[in-house]
Image (cartoon, rainbow, N blue to C red):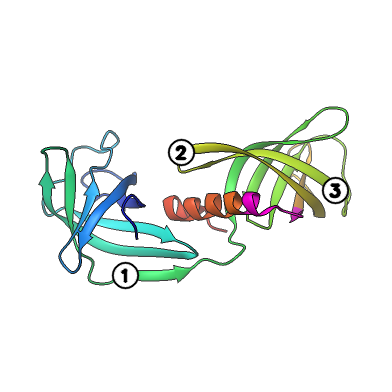
Amino acid sequence: MKVGDRLIVEPPPKLGEQAAVVRLIGYVNDLSLLVTMPDTRNWSGAPIEGDAFSVRAFSGRHAYGFLTAVEKRIVTPFEYLHLRFPRQITMRQIRNAERIATRLNARILESTQPVPAVVTNLSASGAELRIAGATRRVTDALAIELILEVHEVRTPVLVNAVIRNVSEVADADGFNYGVQFVDVNPQVNIFLKSFVYQNLVEQPHKRL
């Protein structure tokens, strides 16, 4: 991990259930991790010495997790926390095509006018789209435009895809389309993977 990397901290039950993001300031091996103060507006109070935390992070194609506790809360010259150095760290390799549940607004770019769509799940290699209107066919080509937010930066992404399967949406107008991305340029591929990895760390329940 590098200085400035984001860590996801889950508070003890007495403070709340919503995870918060902190950034790594530095560490002393086997002694202490120094992290920024989490945003506690959604918690019942600020963490104090002895409060236990579950921490998650990712780096490259690996997700990490460990348990720790607050050893010291520093308030000057700015607020930050000394966390107990983890005694055990779990690691899991992230598959190349990890898939997450989403609800992203997108547009299908066509010659007449863009058609709205919703991305209901996403991986670096494909997606499931919900599109109202006329049925499209397997092997049809699509140009999909969507916006991905990675590390608080919103980036428009345009990706080409081919429909691989079609299913009707229960109790709703329209169809679900499983698509495979094709001819993805390296920069878009990085954005897709970063978006998926970030969601795996911050909201692991979205993993499919």
Q: Which amino acid does label 3 sit on?
A: Ala
Disc 2 residue type (three-letter) = Glu
**Residue 152 numbered tag:** 2
Q: Earlier in the sequence, mark 2 or mark 1?
A: 1
Structural distance between the alpha carbons of marks 3 and 2: 31 Å
| Gap between marks 1 and 3 measured at Cα | 44 Å
Residue 181 colored magenta?
Answer: yes
Of all residues, the one furthest to the top in this rendering is: 113
Q: Nearer the viewer, residue 57 or 121?
A: 57
Residue 75, image x and y in percent? 11, 39
Q: x%, y% of residue 78? A: 16, 38
- Residue depicted at x 53% and y 57%: 207
Q: How far apart are marks 2 and 1 (CA)?
A: 27 Å
- The answer to whether 76 appears left or right of 175 in the picture is left
Amino acid type, mark 1: Ile
Identity of the residue drawn at 34% across and 52% down: 7
Q: Which of marks 1 and 3 is nearer the N terminus?
A: 1
The magenta segment is 179-189
Which quarter of the rendered picture does the C terminus lie within?
Answer: bottom right
Q: Name the residue under label 3.
A: 141
Mark 2 or 1, which is nearer the eye?
2
